[in-house]
Image: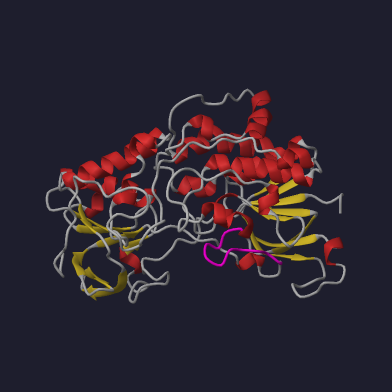
Amino acid sequence: MSELPVVVIGAGPQGLAAAAHLTERGLDAIVVERGASAGAAVTEWGHVRLFSAWPELTDAAARRLLEPTGWAAPESGYPTGAEWVAGYLAPLGAALGERILYGTTVTGIARQGRDKVVDSGRKGQPFVVHTVDQDGRDGRILARAVIDASGTWTLPNPAGADGLLAVGEAAAAERVSYRIPDDVSELAGSHVVVIGAGHSATHAVLRLSELARREPGTRVTWLLRRGSTASVFGGGAGDELPERAALGSRARKVIEAGVVDVVTGFRVTEFQHDGDVLTLLAEDGRDVTGVAHVFALTGFRPDTSILRELRIALDPVLDAVAGIAAEIDPNIHSCGSVGATGARQLVQPEQGFFIVGAKSYGRAPTFLALTGYEQVRSVVAHLAGDHEAAERNELVLPDTGVCGGAGGFDAEGSGCCAAPAVLQIGERPVSVG
């Protein structure tokens, strides 16, 4: 099998970095990307500014591959997704050249001649990566190892609070979006709802608040499942990522100014239709009425359907790689950063198969690009037989200063931070429409 390539799934930041490390170590790499270009998923949120600075967004092996081409690493500033692609991901894709198969979707991975049940001779068989190209033609690629860096972008979580589509959510598809909006001008003068408490939801709320300031009659309602607003404002001065801290501070200001209405403890169970508007119902009987559009930004989950014929170990709670779940579980960790993880933690029962990047974190929301770059550095070192390098931890993550899930889900002060004293989101009437 040493004659076979390592197949990397996904030409996003971690997939491209994995290919750069493989190339640097003299290992053949094939990157399979469903999009038409490097960083295709990032391009879809190109209008969003990252809270990581340029030095935290490029991988060391990728820089070494790019520098002979005349490329220079950006030294400062916080790029948008589009700038990240143009300034780094696209040049890296070009440098990797024919190693990347664009417009090709992985439909499944298996061991050659062995389904999931068969033990005999399993470890001695290469992987078979099944694909379909943009013209619908099936293909197979034999591989000595597979690195799944396909991310979670294609599978956003629903608005329904129990993890499944709320009643009527599918029927409301034309009025529900699961991505951070760019141009929101068509929503001027209408009532818009944002569901979610993470950075994506905060971005959306801030963009919509700008519209509400400009256009009279525009209403923005922010629905939080938790009983507290504490988690949405970030770590403030304790956050070593200044742009993330600034995001939370701006959110606090628009709420204090009354530009955005916040409703806590609202867990969506149903979408009701009344002509061109929606009513959202909560499990406790409250409702939000007269809604023209909903942005459901409740996170993402990994698509594991392509892995059904492999023997993998995923955490039953997070859908994350089992070996790192205890380090990233938001039910356990409340403050501070999560340690970097490498090949030893990412190893799977299927020898030679690794899940890296955002997909390795499953449903956990704390992933940083820096973590992914350390993952692929360690994994590739392991595949190259450099076990000392694979065990070495070369990354120090910034302190988040962010409060997470530890503590009561319904508590007004959840985790290690108290609710902001300046905000009194008290009891709401049954109808907030």
Query: Which residue shows up at 29% across the image and 54% down it?
Result: 413
Residue 62 lies in quadrant: top right
| Pick the front one: 170 or 97 | 170
Q: Quadrant of the C terminus?
A: bottom left
| Pick the front one: 43 or 368 | 368
Q: Is residue 174 above or below residue 254?
A: below
Q: Quadrant of the N terminus?
A: bottom right
Residue 137 lies in quadrant: bottom right
Residue 284, x across and y down, in percent: 25, 73
Residue 138 lies in quadrant: bottom right
Residue 389, x across and y down, in percent: 74, 38
Magenta span covers which residues? 311-321
Q: Is residue 298 above or below residue 205?
A: below
| Pick the front one: 205 or 374 | 374
Residue 396, x across and y down, in percent: 56, 35
Query: Which residue shows up at 50% across the image and 61% down it?
Result: 301
